[in-house]
Image (cartoon, helix red, strand yellow):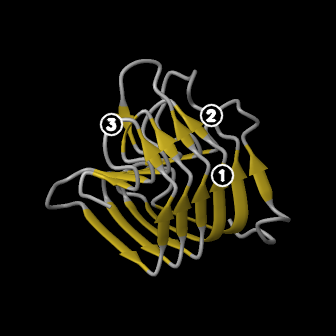
Amino acid sequence: INGNGITNTIIDGSGIERIFDVFPPAASTFDISNLTLQNGDTRTTAFRQGGAIYLHNPVTSTFSSIQVINNFSGSNGAIDNLGSLTINNSLISNNQTIPTSGSTVGGGIRNGGTLSINNSTISNNSVRGEGGGIATTTSETVIVSINNSTISGNTASVTGGGIGNGGG
């Protein structure tokens, strides 16, 4: 999906449900660029992961020049990645993950696959749990690379305001 710029192409979830749920065999690749995703909300749905986007394994995705803003999740971030995700020149901001009880991970992004972030900003996201900006699982198959990016102003009630499961 290639939009006409972040201010001209806005996909609004209207606080009703997740915006994109991408899973094989329906799609093995999913790329978006030049648009804004806002107001997705999975707090009251049966499947609460990924307030804006849920990328199942083995989906490969590239997000370029997008904004993911003001989304709510009941679990695992505005973006929940289990595949391979590259984010370039983008903003992930003002997203909240608020479980109905207990704690969870990932305010902005929850990663359980391969994640590469380049020239992007992860800011002002929050989670009741771990990893306000980014939460990533730890295993030998999980790879995270962050280059020339800003991670700031994120909060977590447990640990890892910027990045959970590994510092930041």
Residue type, mark 2 in image: Asp
Label 2 residue SS? loop
- Binning the other alpha carbons within 10 Å of mark 3 as few (below 14), some (14 to 19) or many (20 upward) gives some
Query: Residue at the spot x=48%, y=75% of the render?
Result: 149
Spatial separation of the CA atoms under disc 3 and disc 1: 23 Å
Q: To which residue does mark 2 refer?
A: 41
Q: Earlier in the sequence, mark 2 or mark 3?
A: 2
Three-letter residue code for mark 3: Val
Place of residue 145 in the rendered image (x, y in percent of width and height, measured from the top left)? 33, 73
Which of discs 2 and 3 lies nearer the camera? The answer is: 3
Determine the residue positioned at 49% across, 51% down.
Answer: 154
Question: Residue 56: which numbered mark, if any?
Answer: none
Q: Is residue 141 left or right of residue 135?
A: left
- The relative height of residue 47 versus residue 26 in the rendered view (above or below) is above
Other-residue count near label 1 (Cα within 10 Å), few / some / many at <14 / 14–19 / ≥20: many
| Quarter location, residue 1 | bottom right
The image quadrant of residue 65 is: bottom right
Q: Distance between the Cα atoms at labels 2 and 3?
A: 22 Å
Left or right position of 61 against 11:
left
Residue wearing tag 3: 158
For badge 1, the amino acid type reads: Ile
Q: What element carries label 1?
A: strand
Name the residue located 47 percent from the left edge and 19 percent from the top edge.
100
**Considering the numbered disc 3 on the image, is that residue within a helix, a strand or a loop?**
loop
Whole-angstrom CA distance, mark 2 to mark 1, is: 11 Å
Residue 142, position in %: x, y? 24, 60
The vertical placement of 30 against 17, above or below, is: below
Front residue of this view, candidates 68 and 34: 68
Task: Kindly identify which numbered label has been placed on residue 69.
Answer: 1
